[in-house]
Amino acid sequence: MALSIRPVPILNDNYAWFLRDGESGATALVDPAEEAPLVEAVEEAGGRLDQIFLTHHHADHVVATDALRKRYGSIVTGAAADAYRLPMLDRAVVDGDAIAVGGAIGTVMETPGHTRGHIAFYFSATPALFCGDTLFSLGCGRLFEGTAEEMFHSLRRIAALPDSTLICCGHEYTLANTRFALEVEPDNFALHARVAEIETLRAEARPTVPVTLGLEKRTNPFLLAPDVGTFARLRQQKDAFR
């Protein structure tokens, strides 16, 4: 059975991601930052939380980690490079390390740019990428610690994954991102179709993610940037965009 994936809305506009391996029943959460809705999600799925995966150190991705670990005895995995500023890790990982949720095998990808120690988790059989704040639908993370070169390289690594990969990001920013995307890609037919879909989803209070990487490669201006110079200019424009 495949890995099931559920976005759990938390805080104002964050998503944690609940994963369950259908064969073994093993479960995991990615980026837990609000205890009550995540406990509710875990209990609805049978009250088992084997693992917690952390993409980066920002509080809106980690603050419920210790409470959930204490409640469920979960094993916490995060970047070795950020171990000093993450909740205590049971497993500190680096690029290329294998992870697993039951029989679902994944790989750690280092994706610096938003933060220096940012990582993502890629499960090839599904396929799905849990990318935190590196890539958003129609956007990407701000460069709080990394450089444009680092973020561009991280996005290129992601873009090399199969187009069918589900992009499971950390925020519901998609509707807000449409304004800038249309500003810089006004003649992009695929983007206009995606915007119409997004507006319908949000009007119905439904998530806009996960979204396939293939669609993002056709509509996301940051993935469409051909070189790091263009990417850097777009990122600066977006930072100042109102």
Image (tube, rainbow, N blue to C red):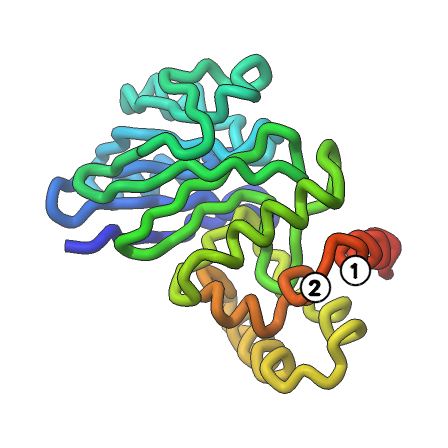
Which residue position holds label 1?
230
Which residue position holds label 2?
226
Image quadrant in which the C terminus is located? bottom right
| Residue at the far left in the pictured view | 23
Side of 198 relative to 17 (left or right): right
Side of 57 relative to 150 (left or right): left
Quarter holding residue 52: top left
Neighbours of disc 2 within 10 Å: few (<14), some (14-19), many (20+): few
* Contact flag, marks 2 and 1 (Cβ < 8 Å): yes
User: Is any atom of residue 41 visible in this view?
Assistant: yes
Query: Residue at image x 36%, y 21%?
Result: 69
Query: Residue at image x 46%, y 32%?
Result: 95
Real-space Cα distance between discs 2 and 1? 7 Å
Estimate the x, y position of residue 147 in percent, counting from the top left.
75, 39
Query: Residue at image x 59%, y 28%?
Result: 117
Image position of 28 with respect to 67: above or below: below
Query: Residue at image x 38%, y 25%?
Result: 68
Q: Nearer the viewer, residue 213 or 157?
A: 157
Label 2: element kind? loop
Figure disc tally: 2
Image position of 134 with respect to 202: above or below: above
Estimate the x, y position of residue 194 in percent, counting from the top left.
57, 77
Side of 76 relative to 238 (left or right): left
Amino acid tagged 2: Pro
Estimate the x, y position of residue 227 in percent, counting from the top left.
72, 58
Estimate the x, y position of residue 5 in percent, counting from the top left.
33, 52
